[in-house]
Image (spheres, rainbow, N blue to C red):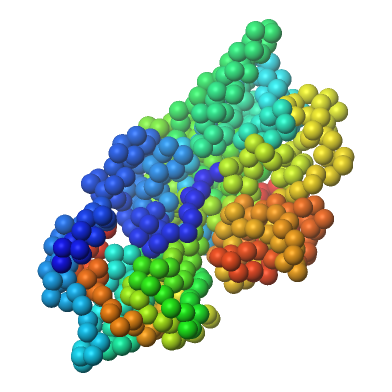
Amino acid sequence: MAHIRLGFKNLRDVLNAVGGPRRSSAKRFFAQDAELKRTALYDFHVAEGAKMVPFAGWEMPVKYKTGITEEHLHVRQQVGIFDVSHMLQTRVEGKDRKEFMEKMVVTDIQGLQDNQGTLTVFTNDQGGILDDLIINNTDKDYLYVVSNAGCADTDLAHMKATEASFQKSGGDVKLSVIENALLAVQGPQMVSVLQPGVDFDLKNLPFMTTTEGKVFGVEGCRITRCGYTGEDGVEISVPQSGAEQLLSSLLASSHASVKMIGLGARDSLRLEAGLCLYGNDINATTTPVEANLTWLVSKTRRQKLDFPGAEIIVNQIKKKPTKRRVGFVSSGAPIRGHAKIFSEDGSELIGETTSGCPSPSLKVNVSMGYVQTPFAKNGTKIKIEVRKKMVDAEVSKMPFVPSKYYILK
Amino acid sequence: MAASFARRAIFPTYRCLNGLTRYRQNACHARFISLSNNFQASQWFTKDHEWVTIDGQKGTIGISNYAQEKLGEIVYVELPEIGTSIDAEEVAGCLESVKAASDIVNPVSGTVTEINEALKDEPALVNSKPMDEGWLYKMDLASDVRTDDLMDAAAYKEYCKSCD
């Protein structure tokens, strides 16, 4: 979801994008900056020495003072906080709200328990993915939906159009945007940092569940056990007025070292966790089956065939898709997106990578992409082209780094 | 002189006024290096943050401390092959950090004679010792090496200030 896209550039351009502290206002991006949105924590980031970059129409921190590798490892070892307020938070009310969401997504929403959430995807009539999102079935008579900043405009338009037709046919639903800030608190020490600030036991909030509450004195927060790093973590939706107070309390924790983390490390963390970035690893031309997200397509929905692109998707589940998203591990030149993938002997073009980076945790290069199905088996040896040279790589299971979600046994 | 000023005028946005002024002054008396004369080693910087040390007919190329600091930990270095002729401003190789791949833009024309083999096992030498042990490659310089598009250390220092 959060990410920064960098092609091959000279040092100067790369430094402009990832390197130095904040650009002074006289620089060449001035006109563009003027149109960018800022989160409630913008001043806080700047004071922390963040390098701010344009991302999905927002001015966001790509890294802070120490750098991406250090930030990445800090999340794997301690606790990191990401400002993800640019993501679209939506409130879906009305008695037919679950049926309404099922008009657009592939997952069984009616079957969610109270305060349970799920990852899912909006699909189009061809079975392509329009966005990935999380739907939480709160026990307060509304669904709390979080989707990507990069798709915010199209997601909202899609949901509003569906709302209009749904209401026309007598359905009871009402959409509204939640203007809260959103903080992701991620890492193995998250519980020790957050527990002192909440009046419930975090043991009772397993992965993909949500609750309302006060956090470090800030009223009106929604705490959801989820994240985009593979670590145990929560995302806290907090009224903008209380965002900085909450952030300061978390950073001041005496129970673990808590640091701010930028979008750069967010991208390398999600890659190691094998999680998709919309626009790179999944898009309107890839189906959930091809994207290895078949598990999102619930049994009940497969039977009812009542979501956009259902026939195509269910047919692909039965017959196997022609291409599939898999992970790759390699050494040597790091693999990024849009690299061509060849069979081991180099004779046959079998696919293309969609994203990749040197893994700070594993010290090898990890990447993901689509290959023709016969090459999708773990352990298959392949070649990936980087700057006109062939790099040896192997199809690998994902996540590359084992996930540490808090799941009740 | 007129030609070199015209060339700069094509890329005005990259330059800072401070750096540019000093850099022009320097360019005036050091825009040509005659290889037949015995010159002391001199160090020059590019606006892309590479450096080149010129000693007679030999050149050694690296990236600046400013660049390594901003790039973060270098995890992979791709260098040109020995024997390759590379023009000034041509891409000579690549430096990779977790998030970014950055081209190495060759500062002066020449033929590659040696690459820093130590970077294969320890690419982060570029971070720890960018100005000496973290050098990238050495060249036999072309006979008419021009430094008038390059900055000396003082001008480069000013230029970096403008990049922040």
Q: Is residue A205 above or below residue A123?
A: below
Farthest-out residue, bottom = B38
Residue occupying the point 76% across, 48% down: A323
Whether A297 is drawn above or below B133: the answer is above
Image quarter hosting the N terminus of chain A: top right
Left or right: A394 with respect to A331?
right
Res. A363 in view: no
x, y (%) of residue A268? 55, 56
- Quick check: B60 left or right of A232? left
Q: Give the left or right position of residue B10, taking residue A83 as reference.
A: left
x and y percent of residue A184 in the render?
51, 44
Residue B3 in view (yes/no): yes
Task: Pick the residue in front: B67 or B144.
Answer: B144
Please provide percent x and percent y for residue A278. Answer: 59, 42
Residue A218 location, quadrant: top left
Query: In the rendered picture of this protein, how many numbered marks are placed on residues?
Result: 0
Q: Give the x, y percent position of residue B35.
A: 25, 87
**Residue at 43% across / 82% down in the picture?**
B112
In the image, residue A59 sits, relative to residue A335, either above or below, namely: above
- Residue pictured at 32% horizontal, 48% vertical: A46
Nearest to the observer: residue B38 or residue A62: B38
Frontmost residue, A344 versus A220: A344
Residue at the location (35% across, 60% down)?
A12
Q: Pick the residue in front: B127 or A222.
A: B127
